[in-house]
Image (cartoon, rainbow, N blue to C red):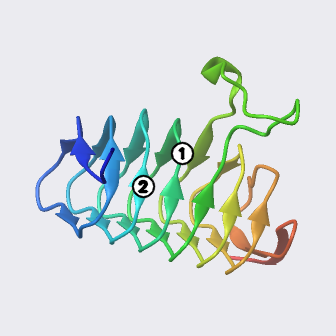
């Protein structure tokens, strides 16, 4: 039986992690907060001062910038099941990059995209395309509501 664990995690100073969590093969910069029931998979980097709230899932190959806020229950997904099933070839999966100072509301889903600095994603939104302009985005699919 496998249990929730912290394995092969590189942590900066002042990292706070609330159990239970499942973190492996990832990097957490200084002053990162990880709430309970969070899973962060391998080849993922969380920038300094970022906060990941409870029940969030961050899949492999995600980079989250500095001072980001990830709300409760946010899901990151980069295997699009293009053939109707999981793709075992990880090299074919998309990468997810979240810039600095990004806030993602609770229950949002982030697919294989890039989100630029200073963006706000509304709760429950589904981000299906890269965001290149600072602003507030919401909906399914997420659309620009106003510029910041």
Q: Is residue 125 above or below residue 63?
A: below
Locate residue 60, reporting x and y percent. Answer: 51, 38
Residue located 49% across and 43% down the image: 63
- Give the label on residue 39, or none: 2
Q: Quadrant of the C terminus?
A: bottom right
Where does the image place residue 49, in percent across and percent down from the top left? 30, 64
SS for callout 2:
strand
Q: Mark 1 highlights which residue?
A: 59
For residue 45, side relative to residue 28 (left or right) = right
Which residue: 52% across, 42% down?
A: 62
Helix, strand, or loop for circle 1?
A: loop
Label tally? 2
Between 113 and 134, the one nearer to me in the picture: 113
Residue count near mark 2 (Cα–Cα under 10 Å), binned few <14, some 14–19, many ≥20: many
Please tell me which residue is depicted at 33% across the width and 71% down the height of the picture: 36
Farthest residue in the front direction? 1
The x and y percentages for residue 113 are 71, 46
| Residue contact at pointers 2 and 1, CB within 8 angstroms | no
Residue found at x 71% / y 43%: 112
Say whether disc 2 or disc 1 marks the residue closer to the N-terminus: 2
Q: Quadrant of residue 126?
A: bottom right
**On the rendered image, what quadrant is the N terminus found in?**
top left
**Of residues 115 and 92, which is closer to you in this image?**
92
- Quarter of the image for residue 94 reads top right
Nearer to the camera, 88 or 112: 88
Q: Is residue 22 above or below residue 84?
A: below
């Amino acid at each position: 039986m496998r249990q929730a664990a912290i394995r092969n995690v590189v942590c900066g100073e002042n990292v706070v992690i609330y159990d239970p969590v499942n973190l492996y093969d990832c990097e957490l910069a200084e002053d990162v907060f990880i709430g309970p029931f969070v899973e962060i998979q391998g080849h993922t980097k969380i920038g300094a001062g970022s906060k990941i709230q409870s029940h969030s899932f961050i899949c492999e190959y995600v980079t989250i910038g500095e001072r980001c806020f990830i709300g409760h229950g946010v899901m990151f997904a980069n295997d699009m099941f293009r053939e109707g099933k999981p793709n075992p070839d990880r090299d074919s999966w998309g990468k997810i990059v979240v810039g600095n100072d990004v806030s993602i509301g609770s229950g949002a889903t982030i697919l294989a995209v890039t989100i630029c600095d200073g963006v706000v994603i509304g709760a429950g939104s589904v981000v299906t395309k890269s965001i290149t302009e600072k602003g507030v985005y919401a909906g399914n699919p997420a659309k620009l509501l106003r510029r910041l």
